[in-house]
Image: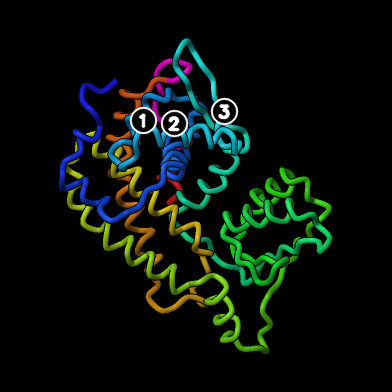
C-alpha cells in the first residue's frame, strides 16, 4: 500500500485537469479495468480500488457500491481471501472492454472502402433481446437509422459476431453490406450521417478534450509515477467517453478540419509519455489474488506499436 493517500500525491497543477468533470464511479472503475487490469486478467483488492478512485472524487462507499453493482451486471466477478474482497472482470466484461480496446488504442484511422455494414433486427424479436443488442451496437458506435436498423462504416466484424453469439441472436439478425452509387450525390448521405451520429455534439466534445489535455504535454517530463497514473486514467476515461460516440466516419463525410483527428494524435502522444511511469506505479501498489500485479504485459505494450 502507498505510504500516503494517492490524492495527496497529485500536485495542484495536475489535479486541475480534472476540474469541471463529473466522473461516475462505475465508469471510472471500467476505465481502470479496461486500460490496466483487463490485459492482465487479474483480480484486484477492493482496498486498492478505493485508493485509486480517490483522486477522481469518488468515495470509498461509492467504490464499494459500484463494485457490487458491476458484479450484479456481469461486468465483474468477486472473490474473497480472508476478510479481503477482490474484483476481476467477468468473461462478458472482458469481452466488452476488448471490443473498446480495439478502437481506443488504434490511433490510425483505417482506410475506408466505401462500404457500410448494416445490421437489421428481426421485427418479431423479443423486447429484452432487442434492448440488449441496441445497447451493445451503440457501444460499438453503430448509428441507429431507424428502430431496427443500425449502420457503421468501419465495423469490427469479430466484435459484431461475438455480440450476436453472446445474445444468441445469429438467426434473428441480418447483416448486409451497402455502398453509395456514383450516380447519386453525397450531400443527402452527409446530412443523414450528421444527424444520425449527432456529429455537432461529438465535434464539440473533441474540441473540449483538446482544450483540456493539450496543456498536459508540457508536464510529461516532470510527472511523478502517481501523477502519471492519474493523468493516464483521466486521459483514457475522457477519450473513451467521446470516442465511443464517434463513428469514425470517412473524411469525405466529415466536416472540414475535424477535431477528432487532432484528438487522436494528442491522446497517442500523451499515452506514450505516461505509460512507463504509470505502469511502475500500478505494479508497486496493487495487490491481486495472485500476489503482485503482473509486469506490463504485451497486450499493453503493443498498443503503442500499432501506429
Which element is circle 2 on?
helix
Q: Earlier in the sequence, mark 3 or mark 2?
A: 2
Residue 5 visible in the shown view? yes
Instruction: Confirm whether residue 298 shows in the render.
Output: no
Q: Which residue is mark 3?
A: 77
Q: Dot 2 corresponds to which residue?
A: 64
Measured in 3D between alpha carbons, the distance from the residue under mark 1 to the one under mark 2, in whole angstroms, is: 8 Å
Q: Element type at marker 3?
A: strand
Residue marked by disc 1: 50
Q: Position of residue 201 (x, y in %)?
A: 43, 70
* First along the sequence among labels 1 and 3: 1
Name the residue located 29 percent from the left edge and 29 percent from the top edge: 281
Give coordinates of residue 163: x percent, y percent.
Answer: 68, 48
| Label 3, label 2: how far apart the Cα atoms are | 13 Å
Label number found at residue 26 = none
Q: Which residues are magenta?
A: 288-303
Amino acid at each position: 500500500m502507498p505510504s500516503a493517500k494517492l490524492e495527496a500525491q497529485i500536485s495542484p497543477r495536475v489535479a486541475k485537469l480534472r476540474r469541471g468533470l463529473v466522473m461516475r464511479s462505475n465508469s471510472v472503475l471500467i476505465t481502470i479495468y479496461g486500460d490496466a487490469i483487463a490485459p492482465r486478467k487479474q483480480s484486484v483488492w477492493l482496498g486498492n480500488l478505493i485508493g485509486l478512485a480517490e483522486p477522481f472524487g469518488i468515495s470509498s462507499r461509492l467504490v464499494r457500491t459500484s463494485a457490487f453493482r458491476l458484479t450484479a451486471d456481469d461486468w465483474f466477478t468477486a472473490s474473497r481471501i480472508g476478510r479481503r474482497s477482490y474484483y476481476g472482470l467477468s468473461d462478458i466484461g472482458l469481452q466488452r472492454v476488448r471490443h473498446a480496446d480495439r478502437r481506443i488504442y488504434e490511433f490510425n484511422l483505417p482506410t475506408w472502402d466505401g462500404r457500410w455494414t448494416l445490421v437489421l433486427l428481426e421485427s418479431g424479436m423479443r423486447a429484452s433481446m432487442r434492448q440488449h443488442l441496441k445497447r451493445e451496437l451503440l457501444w460499438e458506435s453503430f448509428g441507429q437509422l431507424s428502430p431496427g436498423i443500425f449502420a457503421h462504416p468501419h465495423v469490427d466484424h469479430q466484435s459484431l459476431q461475438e455480440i450476436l453469439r453472446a445474445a444468441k441472436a445469429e438467426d434473428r439478425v441480418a447483416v448486409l453490406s451497402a455502398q453509395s452509387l456514383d450516380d447519386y450525390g453525397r450531400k443527402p448521405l452527409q446530412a443523414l450521417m450528421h444527424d444520425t451520429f449527432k456529429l455537432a455534439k461529438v465535434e464539440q466534445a473533441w474540441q473540449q478534450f483538446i482544450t483540456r489535455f493539450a496543456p498536459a504535454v508540457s508536464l510529461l517530463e516532470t510527472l511523478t509515477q502517481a501523477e502519471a497514473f492519474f493523468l493516464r486514467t483521466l486521459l483514457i476515461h475522457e477519450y473513451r467517453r467521446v470516442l465511443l460516440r464517434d463513428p469514425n466516419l470517412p473524411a469525405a463525410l466529415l466536416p472540414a478540419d475535424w477535431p477528432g483527428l487532432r484528438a487522436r494524435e494528442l491522446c497517442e502522444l500523451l499515452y506514450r509519455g505516461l505509460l512507463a511511469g504509470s505502469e511502475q506505479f500500478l505494479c508497486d501498489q496493487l495487490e491481486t489474488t495472485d500476489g503482485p500485479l503482473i509486469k506490463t504485459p504485451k497486450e499493453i505494450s503493443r498498443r503503442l506499436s500499432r501506429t
